[in-house]
Image (cartoon, helix red, strand yellow):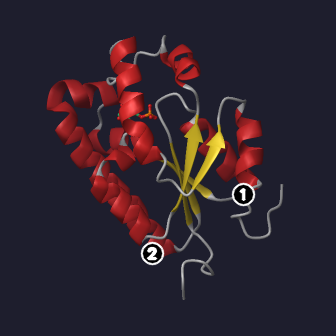
């Protein structure tokens, strides 16, 4: 069976910090009756630490190790249960080539929630739980660095608008069997 005709069980949302991945994934999964997994939440549950605590105590490399481990578990769970699932990835998840490879191997659909940097800056300015939001200049730099990798996603939707509008765009992609916009 090819990927083209096999119904997709795993749909993952990627995009920069503040692009709305977690909220969109939760609402979309609820609308479709699919499972929802928030990868950052998996990481905090597995470590019993918040994301800033992981970065502060163990460093980014350890965070990335746990992130990969948890992603591999989510992929394996989906393969075993065959229950369809929407996953919100972290903003840096697909920057690790092994994570992208894992998702490709699992025939996951990757959707990039695209949002202009000015809007992301506004959304993230007052949020304190993002260790990689240090200052505006480094935030802008990281965004630029990551754009080419986000562009590898299968689909791109504009996430400037409210989550319900973002979901309409995702449904309109026609990737959910029997669900029309
Ligand atoms: C990160 C984004 C965060 C979280 C961690 C690292 C990143 O997730 O995984 O702080 O590298 O961009 P969100 O994109 O949900 O903020």
| 41 to the left or right of 132 | right
Q: Where is residue 146 in the image (x, y as percent from the top left)?
A: 39, 38
Q: In this view, does 155 lie above or below 60?
A: below
- Is residue 41 shown to the viewer in this render? no
Quadrant of the rendering where the C terminus is positioned: bottom right
In this view, the residue farthest toward the bottom is 1
| Front position in the image: 104 or 79 | 104
What residue is disc 1 on?
A: 173
- Quadrant location of ligand 1? top left
Instruction: Specify few, some or many for label 2: CA neighbours under 10 Å numbering under 14, 14-19, or 20 or more.
Output: few
**What residue lies at 30% left-to-right and 25% top-to-bottom?**
52
Q: Where is residue 123 in the image (x, y as percent from the top left)?
A: 55, 18
Q: In which quarter of the image is residue 24?
A: top right
Quadrant of the rendering where the N terminus is positioned: bottom right
Q: Quadrant of residue 9?
A: bottom right
Q: Quadrant of residue 62?
A: top left
- Is residue 111 shown to the viewer in this render? yes
Q: Residue 80 carries which label?
A: 2
Instruction: Specify few, some or many for label 1: CA neighbours under 10 Å numbering under 14, 14-19, or 20 or more.
Output: some
**What residue lies at 49% left-to-right and 48% top-to-bottom?**
151
Specify whether tag 1 is near ligand 1 (CB below 8 Å). no
Dot 2: what SS? helix
| Front position in the image: 78 or 149 | 149
In this view, the residue farthest toward the right is 181
Q: Which mark is residue 159?
A: none
**What residue lies at 41% left-to-right and 15% top-to-bottom?**
128
Dot 1: what SS? loop
| 87 to the left or right of 163 | left
Q: Nearer the viewer, mark 1 or mark 2?
A: 1
| Front position in the image: 75 or 18 | 18
| 163 to the left or right of 26 | right
Specify whether tag 2 is near ligand 1 (CB below 8 Å). no
């Amino acid at each position: 069976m090819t990927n083209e005709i096999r119904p997709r069980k795993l749909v993952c949302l990627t995009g920069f910090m503040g692009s709305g991945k977690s909220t969109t994934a939760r609402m979309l999964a609820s609308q479709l009756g699919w499972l929802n997994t928030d990868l950052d939440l998996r990481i905090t549950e597995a470590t019993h630490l918040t994301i800033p605590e992981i970065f502060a105590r163990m460093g980014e490399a350890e965070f990335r190790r746990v992130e990969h481990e948890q992603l591999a578990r989510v992929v394996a769970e989906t393969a075993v249960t065959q229950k369809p699932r929407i996953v919100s990835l972290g903003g840096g998840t697909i920057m690790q080539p092994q994570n992208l490879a894992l998702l490709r191997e699992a025939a996951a659909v990757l959707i990039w929630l695209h949002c202009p940097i000015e809007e992301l800056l506004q959304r993230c300015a007052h949020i304190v739980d993002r260790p990689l939001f240090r200052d505006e200049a480094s935030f802008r730099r990281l965004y630029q660095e990551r754009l080419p990798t986000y562009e590898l996603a299968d689909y791109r939707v504009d996430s400037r608008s409210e989550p319900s509008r973002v979901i309409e765009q995702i449904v309109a992609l026609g990737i959910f069997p029997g669900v029309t916009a």
